Amino acid sequence: MSLKDSPGLREIQRGELTLLEIRNEACTALVSYQGAQVLSFVPTSGEDLLWLSEKAVYQTGKAIRGGIPLCFPWFGPHPEDASKPAHGFARNREWQLVDVQAGADSHRLRFRLEDDEQTRGLWPYRFVAELEITLGHTLELALSVNNRDDQPFTLSNAFHSYFPIQDIRKARVDGLDGVTYIDQLLAGRPRLIQQDGVSFSGETDRIYLDAGGDYRMVDLSRPRQIGVHASNCRSAIVWNPWQEKTAALTDMLASAWTSMACLECGNVEENRLLLRSGEDVTCLLRLTEG
Ligand code: BG6
């Protein structure tokens, strides 16, 4: 029996991409082989913890707008070569499903991405990355990267989670009070200190450094809270494109900026990771309702 035929799994086609639909007693979920990207996670007793664009494009090699794309091995534009894909190549590549553990109220899927000629053309190192996704009462992601090269490398990574919000103007991110952030939208990318919770009143694109790893996405208009717990992720990124930037994004409805926000956990800027030859690192993310 092939792994995709495990109990509770079913492959479905969306555009050019094959997705895995997962069903167990605790949740239903949708995961794309491209990017090993979780697109939807609905606990049996609740609603989707993730936002997925109604205009998302399901095309080979194109990032899917929503869910939890993985940024790796760099974050944002490539520091030296703008022609390389934004946020690295991991979210645009097909990952291999290498293990499935199916239980009554939980599934554990393990995906793998290894270097090949194409990745070495973009990033000249040998590596193995694995993403273990646990889909049960909570959603857990564990990203491990192993340096298979004979030289050290640095990497940036992020779990680029998109969350649904009823009204962005009444949303708040807690857990970043007192943390230094880079405001990516201001000239010179100044470093500022967060006072209180993060609220949204315009385009927002901030990188928080040396952050604690325990956050809350608070939707005050419902009210609803999503707990975001990260380990080995020293940075957090908060992003909302607001009206004008959204109009330029062909994979988002013009009004979609009002109903989503990204709170991303990872290691970027000076929090990026150094891996010596043979070393590995594991970064964790857990999302909980309430
Ligand atoms: C965020 C970045 O993480 O991702 C933003 O901080 C960026 O600068 C956003 O615009 C979306 O990126 P992309 O490549 O998915 O459109």
Image (spheres, rainbow, N blue to C red):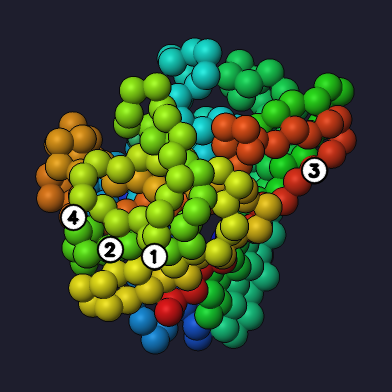
Tell which circle, 4 or 2, labels the residue nearer the N-terminal end: 2
Badge nearest the viewer, 4 or 2: 2
Task: Mark 3 or mark 1: name the one nearer the start of the chain.
Answer: 1
Drawn side of residue 279 relative to residue 215, left or right: right
Residue 13 vs 225, above or below: the answer is above
Residue at (26% x, 72% y) in the render:
220
* Residue behind mark 2: 171
**Does the CB distance between marks 3 and 1 fall below 8 Å?**
no
* Disc with the residue nearer the chain's start (3 vs 4): 4
Q: Identify the amino acid type marked 3.
A: Asp
* Separation of marks 3 and 4 at Cα, in angstroms: 39 Å
Do the CB atoms of the residues marked 3 and 4 lie less than 8 Å apart? no
Give x and y (percent) for residue 22.
Answer: 48, 69
Q: Amino acid at mark 1?
A: Met
Crowdedness of circle 1 by 10 Å Cα count: few (<14), some, many (20+)? many
Q: Which residue bears the numbered disc 4? A: 258
User: In this rendering, which labeled residue sits more in front, label 3 or label 2?
Assistant: 2
Answer whether labels 1 and 4 touch (C-beta < 8 Å): no
CA gap, disc 1 and disc 4: 15 Å
CA gap between label 4 and label 2 equals: 10 Å
SS of the residue at dot 4? helix
Q: Secondary structure at mark 3?
A: strand
Instruction: Looking at the image, tell me whether mark 3 or mark 2 is earlier in sequence order.
Output: 2
Residue 13, horizontal then vertical, whole percent: 37, 53
Picture quadrant of ligand 1 = top left
Give the alpha-carbon distance from disc 2 to disc 1, as whole Å. 7 Å
Along the line of sight, the residue nearer the viewer: 179 or 37: 179
Disc 4 beta carbon < 8 A from ligand 1?
no
Are circles 2 and 1 on residues that touch, CB within 8 Å? yes
Q: Which residue is mark 1?
A: 217
What is the spatial separation of the Cα atoms under label 3 and label 1, in whole angstroms?
30 Å
